[in-house]
Amino acid sequence: KEILPDHMIPSRFGFLESLPQSLGGKLDRKSLQTIDRIDHDEDEGDIVEVCQPGMEHAIELAMAEVLGCERKLSATANFFDQLGGDSLRAAMVVSLLRKKPMTTSVAVKDFYDCPTIRGLALRIIERKRQESDHEKVRNDPTSMARLSPIPAGIIQALWLALTVVTSGPIFWFGVYKVLPFLLERFSLTWLVCVLPFIALAAGLLLLPVYFAFVVLAKTALIGRYQAMRVPVYGNFYLRNWMVQRLVQLMPWGLMAGTVFQNQALRLLGARIGKRVHIHRGVNLLDGGWDLLDLGDDVTLGQDSSLRLVDFVDGELVLAPITIGSGATVDVRAGVCGQAVMEPGSYLGALSVLPCGATLKKGEMWDGVPAQPQGSAPEKAPLDRGSEMKPVAHGLLSLAFGFAVNLIFAIPALAILLGFIDYFAVDGARVIAWIHAPVLSRTLVVLAFAWTLSAAPLGLLFQAGFCRFLGKINPGCISRWSFEYVLVWAKTGAVAAANNWLSGTLFWPIWLRLAGMKVGRNAEVSTVIDVVPEHIKIGEACFFADGIYLGGPRLHQGRVQLKNTEIGPNTFFGNHAVIEAGSNIANDVLLGICTKSHDKIRPGSSWFGHPVFELPRREVVAMPRAVTHDPGPYLFCQRLFWETLRFALPLLPLATFAIWMVTVASRLEEGTSAKVLFLDIPLITTGLAIFSCLLVLMLKWGLLGRTRPGQHGFWSSWCSRWDFLYVAWGAWARGILSSFTGTPFLHWYLRAMGVRIGRSVILSGGFAQVVDPDMIVLDDFATVSGLFQAHSFEDRVLKMDKIHIGRLATVHDGSVLMYGASIGEQSRVLYHSVVMKQEHLLPGCDYEGCPTEVR
């Protein structure tokens, strides 16, 4: 362009205008002749002769800038093996290249497939040649109707106030009427012993009444769901939000995996066949039930997702989903709106079936987005056992689920009975305290002792319960067998203990007590769907959050159980899926959202979906004293913060005591409508706000304003950072979840450090956020994905900001790693992974693990 006048540049190859001389785009006489021949002969193949030198020079400049070298780089040198690059620098080079007009379509995966300057240049040119439209133009979302959140927020506030006003008197009735009634007729000791069973019976009696009310509310507010696309904060959005709030109050966790959950969904409008299995973590509570059609023997795996309701470009989108008989959606896989899975089909773990796609009968698809991978697995033959009726199986599953919770509560009840006997407390004294509560020093000390001892003892009882259930042998059993009830109970016990011990020094000890083999110095965070005796973990392993570790494989009513072994010094990134029966070699790294496979060599690193090997990854070196081998001081300070978790229930207990004292002072004037419908709701609201404010003060007191940086795993900063997240979950997440979908949650997140612009749309999951200071959301962004603003590779906590640009959309299931930047008006599609320090251009759609331009 610097040499030729505009009229000499062929219009068919107008993108050659973007080859500036500063990037090496010098056109010699031969090149001019080539352009002339292309113009006359329309031979597109010769375009390589024109573009390749400038393209190579552009890539060379980007590599040199990232590597910090001034010397000329060889066009055939391997970026990883010969130039000293790693995975982080590869993403940085790609981000630089995307800013150049000729290389906007380059993807991180291209770099790993073609790690030389020449190879990458040819890959980009080939892609350019195949593109019929070089610059995708998107409609300007600013022209879309964007409703103000203020009117909707006022209505949502009134609805939440109505909820508090109605629940306050119900709670008062239970404390001041029902409890004294029981204490007057039964001994206090007997009442404490049967208290869990009374609570279960009351729940079972009241559940049908409440659910009938929910169904009536859904019918009145919505009628039947239909496919539609409506503005967020509009009329339909508000009505659906109200139905969500009502539905989410039901005990879905207790019903998970049983026919009773299926029946409840049918009453809400879903069409669900016989023997359908819906695993833990499958969220079907956002509405759109009339649009769901599941055939017989369908399996929805752990944490899989059906996107009946979605957020796109500031709008609420409802679309139907059909899954045929015998089809399976595997672990953490997703099916988008208007997609169809035909009978007998199979969607692999971590995969996503795009909007409007059809997975053909009997086929298996895998990947992001999913692509055909052959035939679906056959229905496995049974090794042992017999099948039960689904209703009987559901009742037995409920009983064992209740037993897991009861086992945990036994120490707390036993200690409470010991206090009652020692201090000779009877029902009359309890009634007197209810009407005139006094927080004496003795009572406070006893409450501290009871709280600090009950949870650790309860966890020990749960580990013993796993052993008591006996060893479950590998093999293939029926989903409807008694043995699967035991599997369900064991995985449920591990999930319950996860909530207390995940990532602590106590967690490997508990897992060993429950039957798992865990090597020395292993660091284990959240493990999901685990049968303890089927897992062996080597020494010095490190597991990040959300690891699906050798869980049972369910398909068409069959459950395959296999032993899984992990070699020493292995690192698993967040949401990695380790398939049952895997034997992982030593010194292996599996990156975020990556599945294990049978070709993993010792010392190798893998990432992506489909998976590929990382030639060289970034390694951060820190003294082993803060990563692997801490001294006595660092060990004791971590032990202190992790032990402090057991004191977290003291705040809810203290809040209840304050509520009793305050309400009793108001009741001294008599039980009036003002007390029931104004004073009690205000007291309840004030204490809820206090809990959230305490988390806010804890954040700024323990950490202050966090900044991008690195911290050793055993450092005091990491321990305080971890405790804050756990405290947020224990004290505020339950309260803040009521504000999901409202502008009020934005206020709290801003106070915690998140930078949120105007009219940002947040889906569920933002009631608790890791690394709030690292998140920047510009105006009109729509965010449903996950933030991974930190990483623990090499036992070093690495943090950096994540920036989502104006009018951008981050779809559900996608993961943004630290340093990621999403350009204005771009979309990150479902289940995609944006790499560390990767920058996405404005106005483009990105999809894949890792991402590439669509």
Image: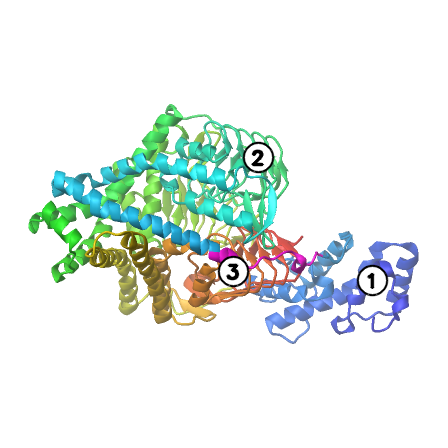
Of the residues tagged 3 and 2, which is closer to the observer? 3
- Measured Cα–Cα span from mark 2 to mark 1: 45 Å
Of the image marks 3 and 2, the number of the one nearer the N terminus: 3
Q: In what element is the residue under mark 1?
A: helix
Of circles 2 and 1, the one toward us is: 2
Q: Which residue is mark 3?
A: 150
Q: Residue at x 62, y 43 (%)?
A: 355
Q: Point out residue 761 in the picture as x, y percentages from the top left corner.
A: 54, 57
- What is the number of the mark on residue 322? 2
User: Which label's residue is closer to the chain start, 2 or 1?
Assistant: 1
> Alpha-carbon distance for marks 3 and 2?
37 Å
Lateral position of residue 102 relative to residue 782, left or right: right
Please tell me in which quadrant of the rendered image residue 12 appears.
bottom right
Residue with the most extreme bottom position: 70
Q: Which mark is residue 14?
A: 1
| Residue 560, quarter of the rendered image | top left
Looking at the image, which residue is at 29% across and 60% down? Answer: 642
Which amino acid is tagged 2?
A: Thr
Spot occupied by residue 323 in the image (x, y as percentages of width and height): 55, 34
Q: Residues within 10 Å of mark 2 (few under 14, many from 20)?
A: many
**Magenta residues?**
138-154
Q: Quadrant of the N terminus?
A: bottom right
In the image, taking residue 108 as reference, residue 300 lies left or right, namely left
Residue 572 seen in the current view: no
**Marks 2 and 1 in Cβ contact (< 8 Å):** no
- Amino acid bearing label 1: Gly
Distance from label 1 to label 3 (Cα)?
A: 47 Å
Q: Which comes sooner in the sequence, label 1 or label 3?
A: 1
